[in-house]
Image: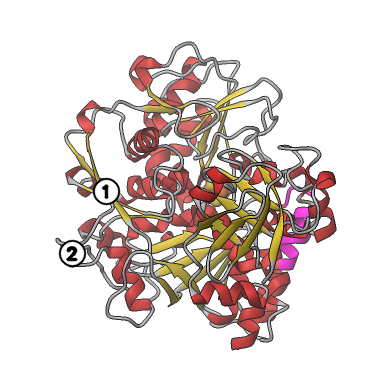
């Protein structure tokens, strides 16, 4: 899977409420979720980002409720990958299940500045900062999770096995 | 090197002799749970899977509890979708109004969860059943959908933090105070990805209700689960209820822990968590002049019979302050009935409480007790996030049932000692 784009940087404890506010959960269509992605954190996010861009954040990304609408909104907005120091557990799980690549790599978070051009190899866990000509190494996903992500998420994966 | 409880449960359900923290396994599930908010999304995902039937009609529990009795047309539609799905698939554990309760009070009471089970629920407080020695954890709707089709789920084997509670509990201190104190100590991501194991002489002496309160809030520390080793107390509770065989797992003496944290509970007084995070805790003696508009007693954290008994003990022969709305919502119909038999409901009503049918209602700001702008509540629930019980500019303070009852009488947050 090819991941390449500009980085948008945010801080710690970005909760699922600011990723997709509860007032928009009356409609779970992807276009609707995408349109309001990160709205309460950065009102301009959806307008300024390009398809394929990445989110780079600090600790405990996606904390709060178990709403799956949060990773869905990020994926539907066109974000190709989220890199953070750490993720809240249910968000992590939901992301893998819906096929949103996420990486835990404090080195990358420290090294990448907003606007840097970044490439990610999901298979090896290698993150390349093209702008700065630096490389960071995240723990690669275990084979099973890679397969989940590349098949397009848990439902597609289950469909291959049932 | 030995294994922790959670490693043993996962190994057995994955058909392995041994697993280690960090490893990914595919495990068989004993029960899959969903409520009226998360199940509709799960049903939509389930329909994309190439199967017609659920993996086991008796191992899925669907509990409409959040907006029930249906608070508006949208919630009525959602519950209808659940009911139709349950009928269509022959799901035996669909709990209709009149039988339903708050999911995490209901399932243990009905014997649907037992020691050693693996349970996933599309609700973050599924971790409550850790009190029975089950590996129970919250997931999203897609996990629920896949689990309903296959009866399996993938897990990363978590590391374990062991908490040891020793000493003598002070008056009016219970499971709620221990867990609030713990979250105050380690923070809302203090147990991120990890299994919490609650141990020590104090836990040995706790009743099941207090244990469930503790496990319930493991998620508020970021934990995957909050386990307590089954003992006599657990087996007494489970006997006569369990609808399936169960198995007791205990951590080995030489199991590897990520951390061991010890507390001397003799120093812990009743705790209050200030807005807007459960980690903002302080002892009741440090709480000053917090006038309240509403006191809420109930929820999956503190809606059990013992919790209502505690509240009634404080409220007996007393009246709530004029400016306070006191709302009590029992966890299940069984708890409600028992509370009537024991005269608890009458005591509460005489004290000025509105006693509601079982529902999540006020806990998530759904219905049955929403706060207006600038209002404050003391609640025995588990979350005090911004806007959790209503208006974004309202406030929720978390406490145990005795403190909430005492505060209803005083009209401000106080210790039970001050009103008795
Ligand atoms: S009582 Fe509150 S925390 Fe518990 S399941 Fe219901 S909404 Fe969630």
Rendered location of residue A11, percent (x, y): 59, 38
User: What range of the chain is rendered magenta?
Assistant: B67-81
Please tell me in which quadrant of the rendered image residue B127 appears: bottom left
Q: Mark 2 points at which residue?
A: B252
Q: Is residue B69 magenta?
A: yes
Left or right of B145? Residue B176 is left
Chain identity of mark 1: B
- Residue that badge 1 annotates: B259
Q: Is residue B322 above or below residue B217?
A: above
Q: In which quarter of the image is the C terminus of chain A?
A: bottom right
Please tell me which residue is depicted at 38% across the width and 79% down the height of the picture.
B14
Does A118 appear in magenta? no
Which secondary structure class fits the magenta region best?
helix
Between A46 and B10, which is closer to the camera in this rendering?
A46
Helix, strand or loop for disc 1: strand
Above or below: residue B99 compared with residue A19: below
């Amino acid at each position: 899977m090819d991941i390449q784009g500009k980085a948008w940087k945010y801080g710690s404890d970005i909760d699922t409420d600011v990723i997709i506010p509860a007032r928009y959960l009356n409609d779970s269509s992807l276009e609707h979720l995408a349109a309001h992605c990160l709205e309460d954190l950065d009102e301009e996010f959806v307008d300024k980002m390009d398809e394929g861009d990445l989110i780079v954040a600090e600790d405990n990304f996606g904390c709060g409720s178990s709403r799956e609408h949060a990773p869905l909104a990020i994926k539907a907005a066109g974000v190709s990958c989220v890199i953070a120091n750490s993720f809240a557990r249910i968000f992590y799980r939901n992301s893998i299940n819906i096929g949103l690549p996420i990486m835990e790599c404090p080195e990358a978070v420290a090294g990448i500045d907003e606007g840097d051009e970044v490439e990610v190899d999901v298979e090896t866990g290698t993150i390349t900062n093209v702008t700065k000509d630096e490389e960071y190494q995240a723990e690669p996903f275990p084979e099973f999770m890679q397969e989940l992500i590349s098949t397009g998420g848990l439902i597609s994966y289950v469909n291959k096995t049932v | 090197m030995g294994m922790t409880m959670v490693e043993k449960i996962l190994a057995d359900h994955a058909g392995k002799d041994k697993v280690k923290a960090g490893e990914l396994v595919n495990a068989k599930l004993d029960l899959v749970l969903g409520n009226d908010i998360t199940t509709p999304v799960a049903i939509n995902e389930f329909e994309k899977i190439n199967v017609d039937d659920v993996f086991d009609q008796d191992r899925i529990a669907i509990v409409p509890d959040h907006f029930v009795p249906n608070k508006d047309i949208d919630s009525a539609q959602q519950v209808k979708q659940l009911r139709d799905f349950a009928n269509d698939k022959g799901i035996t554990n669909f709990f209709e109004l009149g039988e339903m309760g708050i999911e995490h009070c209901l399932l243990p009471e009905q014997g649907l969860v037992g020691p050693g089970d693996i349970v996933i629920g599309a609700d973050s407080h599924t971790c409550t059943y850790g009190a029975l020695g089950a590996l129970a954890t919250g997931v999203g709707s897609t996990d629920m959908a896949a689990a309903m089709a296959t009866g399996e789920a993938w897990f990363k084997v978590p590391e374990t933090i062991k908490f040891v509670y020793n000493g003598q509990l002070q008056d009016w201190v219970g499971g709620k105070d221990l867990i609030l104190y713990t979250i105050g100590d380690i923070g809302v991501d203090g147990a991120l990805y990890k299994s919490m194991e609650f141990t020590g002489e104090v836990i040995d002496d706790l009743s099941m209700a207090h244990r469930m309160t503790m496990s319930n809030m493991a998620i508020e520390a970021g934990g995957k689960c909050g386990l307590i080793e089954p003992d006599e107390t657990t087996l007494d509770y489970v006997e006569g209820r369990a609808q399936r065989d169960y198995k007791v797992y205990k951590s080995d003496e030489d199991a590897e822990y990520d951390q061991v944290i010890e507390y001397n509970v003799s120093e812990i007084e009743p705790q209050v968590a200030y807005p807007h995070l459960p980690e903002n805790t302080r002892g009741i003696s440090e709480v000053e002049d917090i006038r309240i508009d509403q006191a809420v007693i109930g929820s999956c954290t503190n809606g059990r019979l013992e919790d209502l008994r505690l509240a009634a003990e404080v409220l007996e022969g007393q009246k709530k302050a004029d400016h306070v709305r006191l709302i009590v919502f029992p966890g299940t119909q069984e708890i409600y009935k028992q509370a009537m038999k024991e005269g608890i409901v009458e005591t509460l009503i005489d004290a000025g409480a509105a006693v509601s049918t079982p529902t999540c209602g006020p806990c998530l700001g759904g219905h049955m007790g929403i706060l207006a702008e600038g209002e404050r509540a003391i609640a025995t629930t588990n979350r005090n996030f911004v806007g959790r019980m209503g208006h974004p500019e309202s406030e929720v303070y978390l406490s145990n049932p005795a403190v909430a009852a005492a505060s209803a009488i005083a009209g401000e947050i106080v210790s039970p000692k001050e009103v008795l």
